[in-house]
Each structure stands twice: as structure tokens, then as C-alpha cells.
Amino acid sequence: MNKMESSEDSAQFVDKYMPQLIQRVTMVMPIADELLAEDMIHKEMYSNISAARTNQSKMRELFKALHSGGNKVKSTFLSTLRENEPNLVQDLECSGKQRGEPENKSTISLKYKEFIRGEYATVQEYNSLPGEHVKLDDRYTEPLIIQKHRQQREREEEIRSRGQNFYQVMDQRDSETYKSTKVERLFDPDEHGDIQRTVILQGHSGTGKSFTSQKIMSDWAFGRLYEDQFDLVFHLRCKELNQATGRKSLMDLLNYDQSSSSMIKQVLHQSPERVLFLVDGFDELKFSLDVPKDSLPRDPWTQCSPEVTLSGLIRKQILHESFLLVTTRSTALDKLKEVVKHPVRYAEILGFSKEGVEEYFNRFFKKKQHSQQAFDSVRKNETLFTACFIPVICWIICTVYREQFDEGTEMIQSLETTTSIFVEFVATLLKHDCQDLGQSALTILQGLGKLAEKGMEEQQVLFDHDSVSQTVSDPSKVPFLCKFLQKKRVSQTTMYSFMHLSFQEFFTALSYMLLGDEEAQEKVRELLSKVRRGKENSHLLPIVQFLFGIANKEVGKRLEDKKYISCSQGIWTQLKHFILEVIDKEKEDRNAIDYHISSMWLFAFHCLYELHVDDFVKKAMNTYTEFNLTHIPLTKTDCWVLKYCFQHCERIQRLILNWCKLSAEKIKILLPALEKCQHLELQVDDLADDDLDGLLTALGEGKSLELDLTENNFSDEKVQDLLVALTKHKPRNIDIGVKSITSNTADKFMFLVNKAHADLESIGLHCCENVTLEANLQKNGVNGTLQISLWLKVSDMKMICDCIRASGYSLSEIELRFQHKDLYGQDAVSEGLHSQISLRGIEITLCGDPVFDWRKLFQLVHTLEQHPEWDEHADELISLLHSQTSLGDIGLFVSRLTERCATSVISLSQACPNLRMISLHVVEQGLLLEEVLHLLRASKRRPDCRVLVAGWRCRKPADQCTGRKDWSLCCDDSVRLNLHGETFTENVIRHGKKSDRPSYHPKSNRWCVVA
């Protein structure tokens, strides 16, 4: 016996006794150690074996490694097993010799598994040429499967949500609430401990039902799935069963190697509970299974017509102890429900989660770089990224990208248009899933278009059966529709929907192109007229975008080649005039309302992107040079669209991107546009130091800049880089978020102020601190317009102020604010914190340019942070304020106004001769109590010092409230008291409502009472 034969015999022995070895081997880790030392298994496989809890689980993991390693690894395993457990090997060898028939049975079983491995290891794709195939494991990605029926509200949520919101909904579905599960758990006991022998796995077209069936077959044959549950697994494809003729038994319909026939018969006869039948694509059956029960066969050998035999299997008249898994589109679920024997477990494939989409891209591309580039590009397109929950869409997108990579394009820009991918998807399903409908593709598209248009007009995404039947013939067989049952009181109703709202929008646009030229132009004219009316028809905007996509030259040619549509010149003329009109109108509206722009401008850019006709886009974009996108939240898709449109501008005179929810990822997309603009106003959050480098490079030199980088946390080194870079521009308003600063930063800060003094209007450094200084800078006694804002540690603030004075500048109109740092964060909501803190913050205005006593300011901040209780530390606090002779105005924010507090305020007005106004704000739970107000009225005050008190007061004549615990109480009035000299005025501003709560201004951290 040569070495190769010995290796094959060893491998056969290991395969033959796999179940016994899994149960009986105890020295698993010593065996694994030796296999790892001899490089027979990888470290990752070894880790999986080690992590398994029981010996049986460890052996299952080890067998995965053995199967992937082939005969050589199995032979080495057997040799190692002989050394570690010789008695076990000897016992198995003796048992095989004593039972010749079981040994033959095991050998035949292995041959059947080898046959299945050969059949299912590879798959053909939609575009595969003869002889082409790919490995199943290189494509299959586990889908999201749930077992809970959803309510109408939940289905609408899935259909209407987009982008990140959509995948958040999918994450919610992947939970215990929706009974999410995996393929390997489909036959596990349910919550009552019962095992259902029939499982129905439903899903929409293209969600991966057949792929999952093939994966089940492959994994079982390789020992990765159901190895302890089923001795045999059979796959019956309904599309193939349609071709069966004559009389057939179940054995005749099964796909297996004929040499395994005797073994299969034996298992079916002796152990039917160890058999799984996988009926794939029930919705594709052309024949009916509605067969009289008394005519059904009772065994797998009786020959009947194919439909009778299959009906006998599904109704469990044949081998009722066996297990059954049926996959079907949701549209055929009601027919299946009529013939399947209950009880049944229902499960639904929803498609891919966000992680599943990324995993699919990683499997599809051989190079990690390519998969990452493709995935990042798709994520930037919200509509396409949403559609990627459908595996077929993922395949189409990846195929398009692969062609780009094969042509040598290493850095991909983006898919040309969303419409082009939707067209490919529709063409794919029409070709592969609509051949047996008995209708032309044009008829199918026309019916779907009418249904979609009706739904868009009524803003409806769910349709009853009667509505669908009016436009779509035999809707249960149309792959673009989803069908489900919905409970309605004591009965059920059948509902339909498109796979997602975006497909409904696409089919609506397509429907206009399927009409005659004159009727099509009239329909488009009506649509554009509705869109012009404003926000009430904003739900129609995506339809117009798809119309522009269909008008794209390449997309139009693809549709014409398929003989679906032909885009008329009249429609194209209407679209061109419409988009130029939108652009001109937005330009006028923008000027009329101080550069505020509506979302219609962004919509116009999306239309130009879908059109992708460079000459026309250039003409449209060069009609104006100023772009104001303030307060429009930009998605990654929006940024990608803007990048495409802006690249067709010869120049951008002014670009405003304030409060657009820009992140580092989004700003990277827009960097080429920033290079072109002459004046830039930009607000962006959460930039890292590396992101700042890219931004500074794109800005170049010589630009007029207004940058709000407050919500960032740059290192001191990067802040210095930014300050130096700004000296090469004309900065106007600059705010920078910092961690901390050094003397070098202070020097560069003043270098920028000196160099850009003529252009600068304001500049601020922001850290998460509770002390703020705002002041105007003046030089040589002349007041300037430059305002500085410092939200820094007191020590850093002192450093900046010293540097300002050393540079020949002085400060005027100084405002200092101190506030307890815990009170403006999330921790402030605790009742315990509210009850113990009385003093919430202080605002001080200083006259002239006093030289601060920074030591006392340190004390004041420390007092406010460590001892906020007013009544306990009022004297110490007032003493500190008395010492500041330049004190002009002061604002105090307290949670409760006590008599002690009121007395302190009066003494402060008497002690500070320059004090002009004291503002006392009672915030949060406190109320203005009558005894305190009486004290204020009766007090002696300087006649030139005004006291303003703002807060809430209970207006009930008796049993008055002493605190505000419920903001919705209507017994509280918002009041403002003005004490000036001998005069006392009281204004009731508004009766207490929830909307009257004191508002918090995020920019200045000032509390103000809504007036």
C-alpha cells in the first residue's frame, strides 16, 4: 500500500467515524497542539477549538479544520489520535470489521456527501459565461432572518426609512424582540420546547433564499451544519420540478448519485427523522398542489404525477417524521399555507444588515483595498446604500465596480447614477424571474408604473389586493412586489408593497416614459407643475430626480436596447427648462431673504447629478457663483452630489456651509470645492488633527474665511498650525476648539491678530471650561471692531490677556461669565443636584481695561465649583466681588431666591460705586416667594443702580406652590420685576405653559426668560 493510498484510507476512516469521534475523543487539545506544531491547522482555527467549551464542541471545530485541510491533514490527525487514544481507534476498527453492512453504508454516505460537495461548491452568477463559476463561500453572506410578524406601522417604517436610519431599523429587527435567528437554529426547539418539523423561509425577490438553500446543502456536506441532526439532506428545486413529466416517485425526484440508492432507501425506511427535504422556490411552481388527500402517496416509492408526489411530501403524507424546509417569495405564502401541514415555523429573510452589506463587499473583491473603496463609495449614496439590503443590488454594484478595477481604475469616483443601478436591477429580475408570467416586460412595467404612480399621488406605500389587481395582472408572481397578511380585527387582509419606497418612486418615473409621447409630456408637465407649488408636494421630488436619471444618455440607451422606453425630446426639453428655472428662482429667493436657501437648490443639484450630462451641468452651474447652504443638513450623498456639480463651476465666489451637520468624512468629499472658492464660511464638527491637515491644504492661500471649528478638540500643535495658516488668508470670524494652550500658542494667536487686524471681526478659543471672557480689542486708545472670546482655563486665559497687553493692545467692554460646570451638562438633571445647588452662574461686565487680580478670579471660580450654596458662602463671594472696583454690570443665576440672597444683592449694589445693573435670574425649580419680593421692594438701593429680577411666581390666592416640579403647571406666571431708584414695576410676561420654560442659548451659555 503506497503512501497516497494510506492517506486516502486514513481520510476515509476519519470521515466514516466522524460522529463517533466527536462524541468520544477526550484528548482534543493535545491533538490540536500537535497539529498546530506541524502546521496542519492555522492559529485562527486553533483559537476556535480552544475557545469551545465542551470536548464535543472542540471536536466539531477541529473537524472544520480537517475538512478544509484535505486528506493529508486527516491522515496526520489519525496518526496523532492513535498516539493519544489508541484504545478508541482500535475499538472503532474492530467495530467496523464486525459490521460489514454499516461500514458499507457509511462509505456510501460519504460518497453522497462528496457528490453534494461537487454540486454545490460553486455557483453561476447572472452574467456568467459558459464554464464560468465562482465559489459559493466567496459570495454567500449570512442574511438577517426574523420570526416575528410585523405590524403595518413597522412595515411602513422599513419601507420609508433611508440610509443610516434604514439600517438602524434593521438593527432593531435583529433582536430578541423580533425573534431574529440563524440558519443553524431553524430547527431548534421553540420557546415552549417544541421542535417544528416544517419551516417556511419566506423573503422578497433577490433577498437570498436560493443562495441560502445552496449554502445549507454545501455546509451539511462539509460537516459544518446539521451534522448531528440529519444523515441525509435533499434539495428539490421547484423550477426543475416544472420540467418533470410522467409518473414520478419521491425517489425519482431526488438528486443523488445512483450508487447511493440502496443506502438512501435504507435511511428513508429506517430513520426518516434523520432526513431533511429542502424545497426551494415554491413560488416558481407552475402546477397546483391542491390535490385530494386520498389520492396522495404514502411512501417515497409510489409513482404519481410530479404535483401529486410533491404535494404528498409537503403535506407530510410521505415520511411524516422527516423534516421539511420550504423557501418561497412572500407573494406565494398564502398558497403554501393552504397545503402545508401544521404546526409550522415561519421565518423571513429581510436581506442584509449594514454589517452584512460590508461583509458581502469584502467577500466579492479579492483585494481589501478594492472592497473598501467600493463600500465607502456606496455609503455616500443614501438611496443606493439603502437598496443594498437586497443582495442582488449588492451583486450589481460590485460587478460594476469590478469592471472599473479590471480596466485599471484604482481610485473610483462613484457609480454614475442611482438610476443606472435601478435600471440594471429591473432588467436582471425581468430576465431571470419573469420569464414564465405570460406577459411582456413592457406590460409588467406599465402595470407596476400605474400602481406606483397612484401610491405616490396618495402618499401610500401599502396597497390592498383590489387596488393592485386593477393595474397588475397576477401580482403574486411579479417579483418587484412584496405580499403579506395583516390582521384586521377578527379577520386577515392581504397587502402588497414595493420592496422599498425608492423602487416605488423609480417605477413612477418609468411609467411616464412608457406612455405615448404626447401623453407622457402632459404627465411630466403636471408633475413639474405640482413640484413648483412648494413643500406640500416635496414627496414627488425623488420622481423628478429619477426622470433626470432616465434622461441620462447611457441609461436611456440601455432602456431603448431593452425595448422598454424611448425618452422623447419634448420631455428632455421640459426637464432642462424646469431645472434652470429652479436654479434662477432659488437665486432670487436667496437674495430676498438674506442668503437663506431652501432645499430646492440641493434638489436641483441632485437632478443635475442624475442627469450626468457634463455640458448642460456646466451651463447650469455657471449661471451663478454664490452658494449658501446654511441650515441644510447635508448627507454623504448630498456632499458627493455637490462635489460633482461644483467641479463644473469655473469659479466659486462665495460658499457658505454653516450648520450643515458636516463631519470629517463629509468635509473630505467637499475638499475639491473648497479649493475653488474665494470666500468660505464653514462650520464643521469632530475633526481630528489629521483632518485639519487636509482642510488647510485644500484652503490654500488668499481666501476670505469665516471658520467655526468650535466643536473640535485640536491639539496645541495643530492649533498653532491653524493660526499660522490663517495668516496667509483674510480671516474674518474664527472660532477654534482646543484642548489646552501653551505660550507658543498665545504668541501665534497674537501674531495672527496683528497681521489680520484689518480683516478680523472676531476670534475665539474654546475649551470645555466654565469661565468665559469676551472683550473688544483696541490699540492706541482707539476702539476697534475686533472681539475676542476665550472659553479657557483661568490660567490659559491669563496667558492670552498678558500676551494681548504685551503686544500693545488693551481690552474694553469686558464680560466675564462663571458657571458651575456640572449644571450645564447631562448630570444636571438629577434631582439631588438641583436640590443642593443654589448659585448657578455669574456674569460680570467690567468698565475700562482693569488689570485683573487673577488670583482672586481663581478663588471665585474655586468657590463657585466647590461651594455653590449661596447661603453658606454669600459673604465670601460678595467680598470677592466688592474688590473688583471696575464692576459695571452683574448677572446672578440662582435656583432658589432666599432672603439671604436678596440681602446680599442689595449690599453689593451699595458697595460697588460703578455698578450700574444687577440682574437676578431664578432658573429651574425656584419660585419668586412673596416674602423675598417684599424684602427687595423695601430695601434701600443706590438710585443709579437698577435691579432686575426675572423668574416664576405662583398666582394662586391660597396654598401657593413653593417650587416648580412640573413645568406644565398653569398656576405659575413668568414675571419680571424692575427696581430703579424709588420706582418698582412688575410685568407678567406669560402664563405658565410648557413652552414658557426658560430657554438656554447654546452659543453664549446665557439663561434668558422667554418674553
Image (cartoon, grey):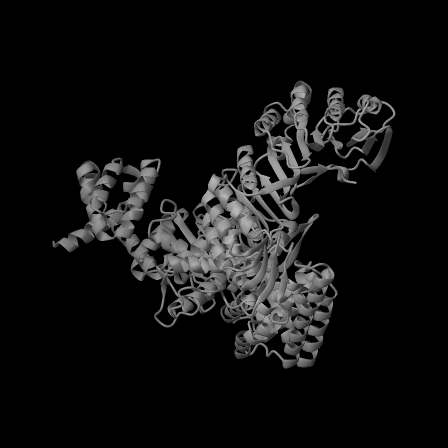
Residue 679 visible from this viewpoint: yes
Q: Left or right: 805 with respect to 943?
A: left
Q: Position of residue 136 (x, y in %)?
A: 38, 59
Q: Left or right: 504 with respect to 716?
A: right
Quarter in which the C terminus is drawn? top right
Q: Return the residue nearer the eye: 110 or 302.
A: 110
Residue 247 visible from this viewpoint: no
Vertical side of 549 occupied by 987: above or below: above
Total labels: the figure holds 0
Q: Left or right: 63 with respect to 125?
A: left
Q: Position of residue 861 (x, y in %)?
A: 60, 28
Q: Which image quarter: residue 857?
A: top right
Q: Residue at x 36, y 63 (%)?
A: 134
Q: Residue at x 71, y 76 (%)?
A: 522
Q: Return the residue nearer the eye: 185 or 579.
A: 579
Q: Return the residue nearer the eye: 104 or 538.
A: 538
Q: Position of residue 310 (x, y in %)?
A: 48, 60
Vertical side of 930 occupied by 608: above or below: below
Taking the view exactly as shown, the residue that stands out farthest to the left is: 1
Q: Return the residue nearer the eye: 404 or 603.
A: 603
Q: Position of residue 485 (x, y in %)?
A: 63, 54
Q: Which image quarter: residue 852?
A: top right
